Structure formats: C-alpha cells, structure tokens
Image: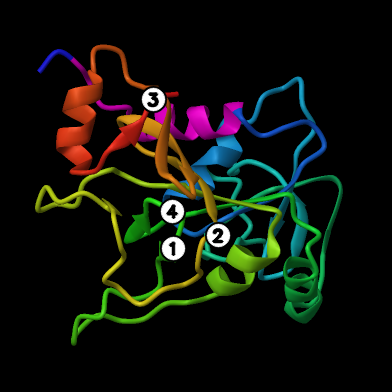
C-alpha cells in the first residue's frame, strides 16, 4: 500500500481548511469537535453548540477546565471574547431557523447522493442518540460529514443506499474521510481530493462505488 491514512488531527485540519471567514458553524459530538483546535488564524469562525453556546473557543489547556462550560458532548470548552451562552431552546431555534452556515457531523453511513444515517444502527442492543442531528441536518445551509471511510469490519460507510435509519434525506454536501474528501451530487460521489498515493481505482475498491473524477 503506497498511501497513508490521515490521522484524526490531519482530518480535522482538512475540514477546518474549508470553513470560510465569518461562518457560523456547529461541530457535532465526537470526531468533529477536534475541528475547533485547527481553525485558521486568518479567519473568524463563530462556533455554536446546541446546548446553548455561541462563540465557543478551542479546548482548554490541561488543568484549566471549567465543567460548567461544556459542549454538547460534555467536553470542557472555552468561550471567546464576545461569546455567550443561553437556553437550549433558543439554540435549537437558531439551528432550525437556517442561521448556521455549516454543521459538521459524524455518521454511521452516508449515501452517494447525500442521505445521512447517524443516530441509530438499527441493531437491537444499540442505544439511539439523535441529539440535535436532525435539526442540524435540515437547518444548516451546508451539512458536512467527518468520519473514517471504513468500519472496524472493513466495510465502507459510503454506500449506494443507507440501510440504517435515516437522519436526513439528501442533506450531506461533503464527506471528509481519513483517505479522501467527496462531494455528494445527484449523480453520485465526486472526488475532491485524496491522500497522496491513493489511486482512483483503489478508492473505488475501498468504497465499492463509482467515484466521479474531481
């Protein structure tokens, strides 16, 4: 194998690279929260958390955590100058009202045309965890997904059709993975970029899907 997967930090940095100046952004629970630590210094990005924070900063330094100031994943965060916190009902009104430019979510599956499944695997013993994902998926102007391409069993999370319960239909615009970045289009997945050394044929073998050239 002549290529190497992106690390979690490299993937977070890749997502952060595409967030435009002045964007209002929600970072979902799990892997997407790391994007906050890689935002470029030359842009102003206003981070929102559905538990009621606007103007969220990066993770605090070790020993400086304030557990009264946490994100939706219960991780301690910082508050930038001018930031605010408020009732989560107001936060959900912000999300549902189309006031967020981008949300970055994790996923169990994403279809080639942008259907999102990220709240339940459908398995009997799985614990469903919808949170604000449905509100974000339909409320944000752009929904991006950040995830490893393959499951632990080596199966692609990018699929022709989701077989897990859907969070939203046709809502995902981009998928950032540890091997490549894709755009979801009505014609299927379009390649934006891939890690050095990964060929188009190898990528199609990994996804088991046709990939449109970028």
Q: Nearer the viewer, mark 1 or mark 4?
A: 4
Secondary structure mostly taken by the magenta-highlighted segment of the chain: helix
Viewer-closest of 39 and 15:
15
Q: Nearer the viewer, mark 4 or mark 2?
A: 4
Distance in Å between CA atoms under marks 3 and 1: 22 Å
Query: At 54% across and 39% down in the image, what residue appears?
Result: 35
Q: Secondary structure at mark 4?
A: loop
Distance in Å between CA atoms under marks 1 and 4: 9 Å
Identify the disc placed on residue 16: none
Residue on which disc 2 sits: 171
Residue on which disc 4 sits: 113
Q: Which residues are magenta?
A: 3-17
Q: Quadrant of residue 18?
A: top right
Left of 111 or right of it: where is 33? Answer: right
Viewer-closest of 6 and 111:
111
Residue on which disc 3 sits: 213
x and y percentages locating residue 103 in the rendered image:
62, 53
Q: Secondary structure at mark 2?
A: loop
Distance in Å between CA atoms under marks 2 and 1: 7 Å
Residue on which disc 1 sits: 116
Residue contact between numbered discs 4 and 2, judged by CB atoms under 8 Å:
no
x and y percentages locating residue 37 in the rendered image:
57, 35
Query: At 27% across and 38% down in the image, what residue appears?
Result: 210
From the viewer's perspective, is residue 204 above or below residue 171?
A: above
Left of 64 or right of it: where is 34? Answer: left
x and y percentages locating residue 14 in the rendered image:
49, 28
Distance in Å between CA atoms under marks 4 and 2: 9 Å
Could you classify mark 1 by the number of other residues whose Cα lies within 10 Å: few (under 14), some (14-19), or many (20 or more)?
Answer: many
Q: Nearer the viewer, mark 3 or mark 1?
A: 3
x and y percentages locating residue 193 in the rendered image:
42, 23
Query: At 24% across and 12% down in the image, what residue appears?
Result: 197
């Amino acid at each position: 194998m002549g290529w190497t997967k992106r690390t979690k930090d490299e993937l977070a940095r890749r997502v952060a690279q595409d967030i435009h100046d002045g964007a209002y952004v929600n970072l979902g629970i799990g892997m997407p929260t790391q994007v906050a630590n890689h935002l470029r210094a030359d842009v102003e990005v206003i981070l929102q958390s559905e538990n009621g924070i606007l103007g969220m900063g990066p993770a605090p330094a070790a020993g400086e955590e304030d557990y009264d100031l946490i994100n939706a994943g219960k991780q301690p965060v910082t508050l930038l100058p001018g930031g605010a916190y408020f009732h989560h009902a107001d936060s959900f009104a912000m999300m549902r009202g189309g006031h967020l430019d981008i949300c970055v979510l994790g996923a169990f599956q994403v279809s080639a045309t942008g259907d999102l499944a990220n709240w339940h695997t459908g398995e009997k013993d799985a614990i469903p965890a919808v949170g604000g994902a449905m509100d974000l998926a339909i409320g944000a102007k752009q929904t991006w997904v950040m995830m490893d391409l393959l499951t632990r069993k080596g199966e692609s999370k990018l699929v022709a059709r989701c077989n897990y319960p859907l969070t939203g239909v046709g809502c995902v615009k981009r998928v950032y993975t540890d091997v490549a970045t894709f755009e979801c289009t009505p014609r299927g997945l379009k390649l934006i970029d891939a890690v050095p050394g990964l060929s188009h044929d190898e990528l199609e073998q990994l996804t088991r899907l046709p990939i449109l050239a970028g």
